[in-house]
Image: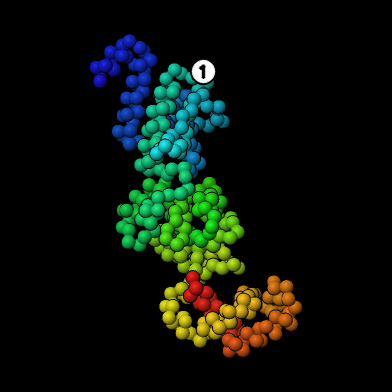
Amino acid sequence: MEALAVRLSGLDPYVDGAIRVIAFYDTLMRRRVDLPALTRASAGLAECVAGFRLHGTGRVIRISPDGRQASAPPSPPSTTAPITLDEEEIGTVWLERPGPPNPLDEVLLDRLAIAAAAVAERYGPARTTMADPALVELVISSDSDEAARARALRLLGFAADLPVRVVAVRSRLPLDQIGALVCPGRPVKAAPLADVGVILTTAIDPARFPAGVRAGIGAAGSPDRSWRQARTALRFTGPREPVIRHADLGALALLAEIPEDAARDNADVAAIARIAGNPEDLETLDTYCATGSQRRAADLLHLHHSSIARRLEQIAKTLDIELTEPTGLTRARIALTAWRLLDD
């Protein structure tokens, strides 16, 4: 084959140049260089600005022929090529050559795209938000060793030096749609896992969750710990607070550690269960516990404060708790939260 290539190159200068370009990129791939190094080498070989963009992260790098970041505003690409991995376009490479393209530019970009796909497969993410559930489970499982977890995170496209935050989600909306909304411009991967959706990201905006979504957000750091926190926070969500950060729960998170049998046997929790069959009473108690004010509860429920007072008086008798006293209000809040955790 090598002898044939030599004979062909002697017959056609284009073939000779193409063979040299292919050999150039074969050498780079054997050296396992990263994407910036690939782009830098390509700019030097092409003698013009070369660039790449990964769709998944939005990362863009433009390198001048001198090996430095291109400082001039981007020119319209003279030649482009898609970076394709597993039949999916995950990015683009291009040249910004002044004037007409060089005859070998297409060969150069074709080989650059192949090399970039190999690097992305090894180190970087694909374009899609949805991820292999097995990889996601490996990241969040407490049984994973750190080497396996780090490798899974790398395959999902997360840098080793960035802490990952885990979000537990319940929603009828597609997970990839939710991930794109709450993590704009950030690396994000999502996968369904058992009865809950999992979102992995380095940063998240809780205010961007759409209506109808319930989400528990773990703290950034160890993904397995963040996952446990996210699942706990998800249990505390409800119509009034559909999105909860574990860090905001404080001591309330301890309620999730109480064994279910112990919670059911508690007199206050059992009393909450008795009034739960009356949605009107349950809503009244919930609103009062959330506001701590009869007048504020009346405003939210669009009722006269005297009506709320009568309802609360009857609820207090059923619960055997003095709701107008600070201690009684605290007992009711804790009992209501503990009862809801039983139904999670």
Left or right: residue 327 versus residue 158 is right
Q: 110 or 67: which is nearer to us?
A: 110
Left or right: residue 240 versus residue 200 is right
Please tell me which residue is depicted at 38% across the width and 43% down the height of the picture: 123
Number of callouts: 1
Tell me where residue 323 sits by quadrant.
bottom right
Please tell me which residue is depicted at 46% across the width and 73% down the height of the picture: 256
Please tell me which residue is depicted at 31% across the width and 29% down the height of the picture: 27
Q: Amino acid at mark 1?
A: Pro
Please tell me which residue is depicted at 48% across the width and 28% down the height of the picture: 80
**Where is residue 51 drawn, in percent x and y?**
47, 31
**Where is residue 55 drawn, in percent x and y?**
49, 40
Tell me where residue 73 sits by quadrant.
top right
Res. 59 in view: no
**Where is residue 148 drawn, in percent x and y?**
32, 53
Q: Which residue bears the numbered disc 1?
A: 100
Left or right: residue 7 versus residue 220 is left
Residue that sits furthest to the front in the current view: 277
On the rendered image, what quadrant is the N terminus found in? top left
**Where is residue 18 drawn, in percent x and y?**
36, 20
Q: 155 or 312: which is nearer to us?
A: 312
**SS for tag 1?**
loop
For label 1, count other residues whose C-alpha is less than 10 Å away and answer few (under 14), some (14-19) or many (20+).
Answer: few
